[in-house]
Image (tube, rainbow, N blue to C red):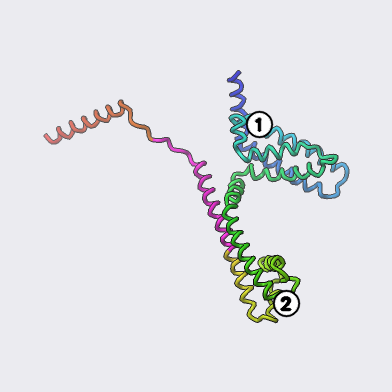
Amino acid sequence: MLANVSGLQSKLKKIDNSKFFQGFIIFVIVVSALSIGAHTYHLPSWMESSLALLDIGITVFFAIEIVIRFLASDGPKRFFSNGWNIFDTIIVIGSLIPAGGSAILLARLLRIFRVLRLVSMIPELRMLVNALLKAIPRMGYIALLMFVIFYIYGAIGSMFFANVNDFLWGDVSVAMLTLFRISTFESWTSIMYETMAVYPLSWIYYLSFIFLTAFVFLNMMVGAVLDVMTQETAAMRGEDAPQEPADKPASAADVAELKMQIEELKGLLMSKAS
């Protein structure tokens, strides 16, 4: 009985790890994404019925695929120790909600998230997402520093420019929203020229703020993500590289054979010397 179970598990592992199966899953995910997009158009009734049948088939396929992966793993603990398996399971279970009645919006929303399964299926995308998630703490500190800069510049702007345009600089919160608009380069020159009519040197305020936010902090954000991405790439390459067998200590037979070879070499050297 145990032999049959282990044999079935090994067969399921081969299926799960095969490139054809992985490629077919990616193909089904792409078809699912196209099907979701097609639902946003006004289609004939026969096409709507065909898409509904296609959606049922895709849902059944994903359910079978997640069962295969679960049975191919070394137990539930090993399966659910992988965060991507948990993510895929939630998406698949959510897709089983019938797309009708009061839950139609929730069902369609969960079916949209099936497209995210591309991330779990493609190792390079997984690496990018893992790098982004691990970079969030560093990005959080950078965002905190950006908030401090925004607050300082917002307070200065509301103090000096409120009399120029109360709608844009009336208080600190409104001034910070205006600064966010400036940081995205949305008509920032018109805002600057408006204040320069009253304060000719106000261009220093704008250019220094843009330099800090658009160049310094943006590069800091990119650098934080790239640093983590480099570490993730090195870790992924280390996992893919074949591990060399560790050096084992020599046995007594190996030592005896080595001694015999040394004695033979000594004898040859002595005979040549004589």
Amino acid at dot 1: Ile
Give the side of residue 235 with respect to residue 85, left or right.
left
Query: If the image is split into quadrants, where does the N terminus sit?
Result: top right
Label 2, secondary structure: give it: loop
Query: What's the mark number on residue 163?
Result: 2
Displayed quadrant of residue 262? top left
Name the residue at 67% across, 39% down.
88
The reply to whether the magenta stretch includes residue 244 is yes
Query: If the image is split into quadrants, where does the C terminus sit?
Result: top left
Check the image and report above or below for 145 versus 97.
Answer: below
Displayed quadrant of residue 109? top right
Q: Position of residue 194 (x, y in %)?
A: 71, 77
- Marks 1 and 2, how far apart at CA: 68 Å
Q: Which residue lies under the disc numbered 1?
A: 68
The reply to whether the magenta stretch includes residue 113 is no
Range covered by the magenta-colored residues: 217-246
* First in residue order: circle 1 vs circle 2: 1
Name the residue at 70% across, 32% down.
64
Q: Nearer the viewer, residue 262 or 227?
A: 227
Looking at the image, is mark 1 or mark 2 nearer the viewer?
2
Q: Position of residue 74 (x, y in %)?
A: 58, 30
Query: What's the mark number on residue 35?
Result: none
Crowding at dot 1, Cα within 10 Å, few <14 / some 14-19 / many 20+, comes out as some
